[in-house]
Amino acid sequence: MLKRILLSLITAGLVTAAQAQSGFTPGYVVTTASDTLRGEVDVRGEVQNSLMCRFRPAASTAPTEYTPDQLKGYGVSSPRRQYVSRQLSTGKPVFAQLLYPGRLSLYSLSLPEQDMQYYTTKPADATLILLTQRDTVEVEYDNRQQREVRVKKRFPLFQPILVNLMDGCYPAQSLISKTALNRVSLVKLFTVYNTCDQQPVRVAVTEDSYKRVRPEILVGGSIARITYAGNPAFSSDAHVEVGAGLQFNPEFFNPRLSFHLQALYARTLLSQQIVVESGGIFQGQTSREDVYARFQTVQIPFLLRADLSRGTIRPYLQAGPVAALNFGRESYRNYYLPNSSVANRNEFSLQTFSLGGVGAGGVSIPAGSLGRVQLEGRLTWLGKLSQENNILGGHTKWSVLTAFTFGR
């Protein structure tokens, strides 16, 4: 008799457990035409919930099976859960559980042979972006223990992704580095972002806005300062600079950093009259030297830029090496003896190629959905300009540039 009672209790427990894992519960489905149909949804575990929805209008009707590409989503009442149709980066459609809806939404998803993972999406984009981290074990030398030890390190790969997506909301940006990859911590972060007073409602953003390579154009003006034969430096005429470039944002990079490869064209004119003391039989008198140099330059700087903030208006600093190619060159010196108007002309050669460095600072301003405008001051250092020594030495160039970078 006791065995029968125990067997009945075990059977009832198994049935109850099975019903807890699988069974119809009040819910609804949302069709692709945005119609909501109420009835009962079969809940069979998170893995099955992500791949298939079994729905019936009433207990007396046969259930219908829906795949993620046949519905906009579905939900159940107890416990309250909502699933929406999204797609993985591979293009496979799935039902992702919606944990927090907003301008930036948070999802969880369980797939066969995988642990539950968290995802988000860009505005107006149904493709899920995986939020993940990587744990590694490294061998390091412990000075205190005087031996090598194994150290577990965690790399929160999801944090740079969220820094980029939550651009413009300072409270959320300051919280990202403290956020752990769990439901409670992520929901707290997404709540802060979606209620951020500094962040306006985002408009639909195209895929081009998140490209890793963006073209840019530049225009501005500059003045060069050049030393001549040990005399104080003198300035060139002001001249116009135009150019183009590419901005690179590698996926593994901090969102505040970017590379810029540019090419800038300018025409430079140097014309200076110098009065010097004469020697020999002209001791005590002055003579005149006229220096003239005209050339065209293409400068190719490769810059590393660091945004000082990730707000709407972004001040930045950048620096890097530069190569200069000079062509269309003409250069000479005219010597005039005291009290003489007859010139003794001496031609000299300009460098074809030179290397140097660039340092710059500026501010980046949004220009709607098209891109961003940069206003920048730049200082360029280059080696000596003349091939001969002690004529035209190293020179610096001050530039004021306006640039436009396409895409956000």
Image: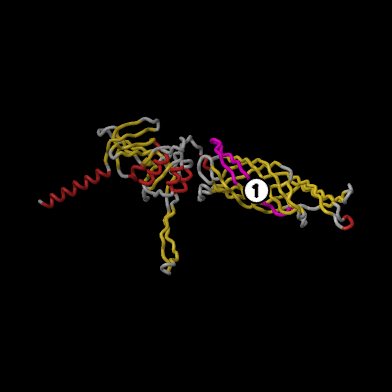
**Which residue lies under the disc numbered 1?**
379
Q: Viewed as shown, does residue 220 lie left or right of 160?
A: right
In the displayed image of the protein, which residue is found farthest to the left? 1
The mark tally for this picture is: 1
At x 45%, y 45%, the residue is: 173
Percent across and percent down for residue 362 are 59, 44
Percent across and percent down for residue 9 are 16, 48
Determine which quarter of the picture holds residue 281. bottom right
In the displayed image of the protein, which residue is found farthest to the bottom? 146
- Within 10 Å of disc 1 (Cα), the crowding (few <14, some 14-19, many 20+) is some
Tell me if residue 397 comes above or below residue 147 in the rendering.
Answer: above
Magenta span main SS: strand
Q: Which colour scheme is used?
A: secondary structure
Percent across and percent down for residue 154 are 42, 55
Percent across and percent down for residue 346 are 84, 52
Judge whether residue 369 is colored magenta. yes
Q: Nearer the viewer, residue 283 or 100?
A: 283
Q: Which of 20 and 312 is in front in this view?
A: 312
At x 87%, y 49%, the residue is: 343
Q: Which of 395 and 257 is in front in this view?
A: 395
Judge whether residue 95 is colored magenta. no
Determine which quarter of the picture holds residue 60. top left
In the displayed image of the protein, which residue is found farthest to the front? 284
Amino acid at the residue labelled 1: Leu
Q: Which of 295 and 208 is in front in this view?
A: 295
Is label 1 in a helix, a strand or a loop? strand
- Which portion, as a residue range, is magenta? 361-385
